[in-house]
Image: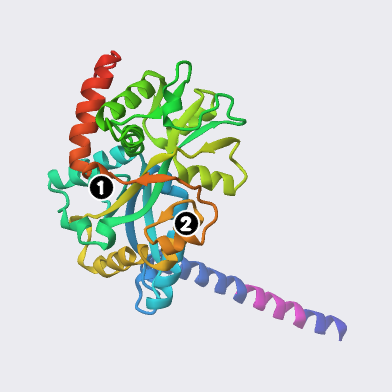
Amino acid sequence: MNLYLATIKLIRVRRWTEKLNFDRRILARQMRTWFPSMFWILLFGYAVWPWMPWQARPPVTVTFYGFSILEESMNGTVFPAFQDTWREASGEHVEFISSFAGSGTVTNQLIMGVPAQLALLSLELDAQRLADKGLVSRESWESLPHGGIVNRTPMVILVRKGNPKNIRDFSDLARPGIRIVHPDPLTSGGAAWAILAEYGAGMRMHPDRPHQAGLETLKGIWRNVVAQAHSARAARMQFENGFGDALITYEQELLWDRMHGRLDFEIVYPHSTILTEHVLVVVRRNIQPDQRNIVNAFVDFLWSDRAQTLFTRTGFRSVNDRINESNPVFGQIADPFTVADLGGWEKAKREIVDHVWKEQVLKELGRGR
């Protein structure tokens, strides 16, 4: 009896094993038939999934170019603030593609065809170059709030800790033995501003002979220039690496470092200095129809109280004096002036940068270009 039952179980196991092997063969044959088709179906589904109607739309992008010292301010505060504002208003996410370099370099890049939709330049002179090349119209910045000026910062003097050379004003930079680091006016907007600051300070110090005093101050300072760099930021790096006794640069970058405990030097505020004014241009040829609303919204945002306050928190001065008054980090300047006090950029470029600095100062010092 036991042998009979064992035989029956053995037969059942053998039949089950044969059926299992048969099912496996069928499954393997089906897999060989269907697997390639399923693979391509799944791959196609993965590729089109982000564009399916129930998925969120891909982020819209804004391409922004700016002069060198804007990088931390834009990437760290202004862009994120606008992203939050736009998401709350539209439900969309916006991505910023940005690039920062000397203002002259940025202008050259735009002329060469980079696809920037917006550019915040160190000086209106660069915006005028773009207009002369037909890339933008003057209306692209003149019709904006404050004539396109987004923010300001004065030109100041950076000296070694303890101010061992006792530098108190631009006139002190013309003393024998002072070594100056200066950005290059051929590529840096900061350098052009510095030339106007130096010349203008001399003019205002001697109103009885303004142009002669401006020339003498400019000549004395440039006699002592020992190193130049392509941008204000690069000049700062030279100074930090031990070149020179003084650096002429923007207040903004120095305040930003001081806020973060990274400033190992001292800021000297001249009696008279220029307030640099930074101009936004809109490159409409690079804006697609479906991007106009978001680009226009960002342009408007730059002059909002929120954005202007963010600029002051990163060391820039707002175009709104009310916002500046609430920020104690800004140094006091007894006699600030603007490029308008020098007749505007076209006149200042022709009479001061080209005629005085390039044709008189550099030639007399044997540095003609």
Q: Which residue type does callout 1 highlight?
A: Ala
Where is residue 80 drawn, in percent x and y? 46, 62
Q: Which residue is drawn at 52% across and 58% down?
A: 327
Numbered tag placed on residue 273 in the rendering: none
Q: Hey, which residue is sitting farthest top in the picture?
A: 366
The residue carrying pointer 1 sits among few (fewer than 14), some (14 to 19) or many (20 or more) residues within 10 Å by Cα, namely few
Question: Is residue 345 found left or right of 294 in the rendered image?
Answer: left
- First in sequence: mark 1 vs mark 2: 2
Which quarter shows the C terminus?
Answer: top left
Numbered tag placed on residue 340 in the rendering: 1
The residue range painted magenta reads 8-18
The correct choice, above or below, for 190 with respect to 54 in the image is above
Where is residue 10 drawn, in percent x and y? 75, 77
Secondary structure, mark 1, is: helix
Q: Hey, which residue is sitting farthest front in the picture?
A: 208
Where is residue 347 drawn, in percent x and y? 18, 39
Q: Is residue 33 in view? A: no
Q: Residue at x 29, y 51 (%)?
A: 279
The residue carrying pointer 2 sits among few (fewer than 14), some (14 to 19) or many (20 or more) residues within 10 Å by Cα, namely many
